[in-house]
Image (cartoon, rainbow, N blue to C red):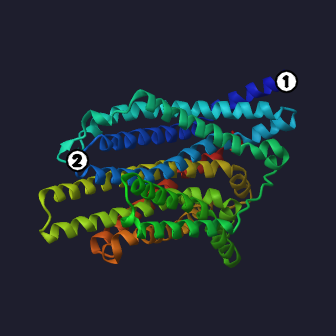
Amino acid sequence: MNTLRLAWLLGRRSAADRGTIVLPVVAFAVVTALLLIVAGGAQAFFSWTGETAFLYQLLAVVALALLIVPLVALGGSAARLSARRRDDRLASLRLLGATPGTVTALTVIESTVLALVGALAGVVVSLGAAPLVGLIPFRGEPLGATVFLHPLLVAVVVLAVGALAALSAVIGLRGVILSPLGVRTRQTAPRMHWMRVVIGLGVVAVTFMAMSVLQLASGFGVVLTIMAVGFGGTVAVLNLVGPWVLRLVASGQAKRAKTPTRLLAARSILESPKAAWRQVSGVAMTSFMAVFAGVGVALLGVAADSGKADAQSLQLFADIRTGVIITVVASFLMVACSVGVNQASAVLDRRAIYVSLDRLGMPVETMNAARSRAVLSPLRITTIGSAVTAAVVIFPLTGLSLLVAPASLLMIAGCLAAGIFLVWLGLRATRPVLARVLADPSPSL
């Protein structure tokens, strides 16, 4: 009975923490809405027949492969935020005698409920946006009602989002269940192996070779599989290699730091390179997509200038431009949402550290400067690294001329600038969160 009463009190305190409830719900709503909208557009393409239907379906697969990994990563970030904020209280319950089953049930149920609430909100948003998406013209006419998914598919997406939240909660609970005292005293040290880089380079190399022989592949299914696995796998390994690279760079910065701001920023990254990566992973994905968008724009310019394209080819090029714009807009929506979730999560996760620094006399301006540097410094590395990786992968299909075309470079630079600006806005927007933490140092987590 005592354990059940403690669990009930845990739920009451958790419900009061509205900020960390709203953020994951909004993130899950965005994830679900974008998944349904993108899937609806792809469904419309796969219902077409004709000579150019294959090309449209191929482009739809590329867009899905580029968007699905960052969408899942955003969902994982939201799930970690909804679960991580309870680690301290759950660890306290373990120390007071609660069983691992009780702790697991509490977290999985709450995380799943928040995810399902957000997913249902995302379904409503997607239904409201579907008529507008149906007005987007492809092949000279609007997509129409073909963007509406079957209710069964919608239910599968909602359940998948809930399952993602439950899985993230269970994974995050391993430290609480195995070592509750370590959670309470923050003794979990991040570990990353150099094999991450080996695996990442291997995936990029295999994708490069696959793209080099793509024209020799026979069969619609084979080409689609190579494109989807190649691009999607490359985006996925960015999440694998990114934290290791940030840890390596931050180690050097910590050794060379000559100001409190630089030292605090480097130590913040070393405390959790994975968390530091999540702060900038959205822009890393946007940087990756920016290369594809730039090449698409350059290709359209070359086709228009040649004057040899027929009406069908011009229509295809115009549709490619429309698809590029949609993909980039979806990417920026993910970046904006990811920045808000991860920045607020980082402040709440380091509540005790910021309160201690405040009591030691560190100015709030110094904390904000260190927080900005801890994000913007890795951002420079990730944007360049992601763009270079995308260029390597797409090089066999486009050649150097399209990659360095002025239109391509301008599009890439514009996307990167917009992504960096969104992160900067996120940093500015979460300053009040830090101010509230310092004004009310009692932990609400």
- Please give the residue where the numbered disc 1 appears in the rendered image: 2
Cα separation between marks 1 and 2:
68 Å
Foreground of the two, 54 or 6: 54
Instruction: Residue at 51% x, 42% y: name it.
Output: 27
Q: Which mark is residue 294?
A: none
Q: Is residue 408 above or below residue 155?
A: below
Local packing at callout 1 (Cα closer than 10 Å; few below 14, some 14-19, many 20+) is few
Residue at the (63%, 56%) spot, across then down: 275
Residue that carries the numbered disc 2 in the rendered image: 50
Picture quadrant of residue 292: bottom left
> Residue at image x 51%, y 50%?
338
Q: Secondary structure at mark 1?
A: helix
In this rendered view, identify the residue nearer to me: 328 or 210: 210
What residue type is disc 2 on?
Gly
Name above or below for residue 339 compared with residue 310: above
Q: What percent of the width, then of the height, locates residue 84?
A: 68, 44
- 380 left or right of 403? right
The one nearer the camera, 256 or 331, is 331
Q: Quadrant of residue 163?
A: top right
Q: Is residue 374 left or right of residue 314?
A: right
Dot 1 or dot 2: first in sequence order is 1
Q: Secondary structure at mark 2?
A: loop
Name the kind of residue labelled 1 in the image: Asn
Looking at the image, residue 277 lies above or below residue 130? below
Crowd tier of the residue under label 2, counting other residues whose Cα lies within 10 Å: few below 14, some 14–19, many 20 or above: few
Picture coordinates of residue 354, whole percent (x, y): 68, 54
Question: Is residue 424 something that shows in the picture?
Answer: no
- Quarter of the image with the N terminus is top right
Residue 112 image position (x, y, % from top left): 61, 33
Which mark is nearer the camera, 1 or 2?
2
Q: Quadrant of the C terminus?
A: top right
**Residue 428: horizontal and vertical position, in percent?**
50, 55
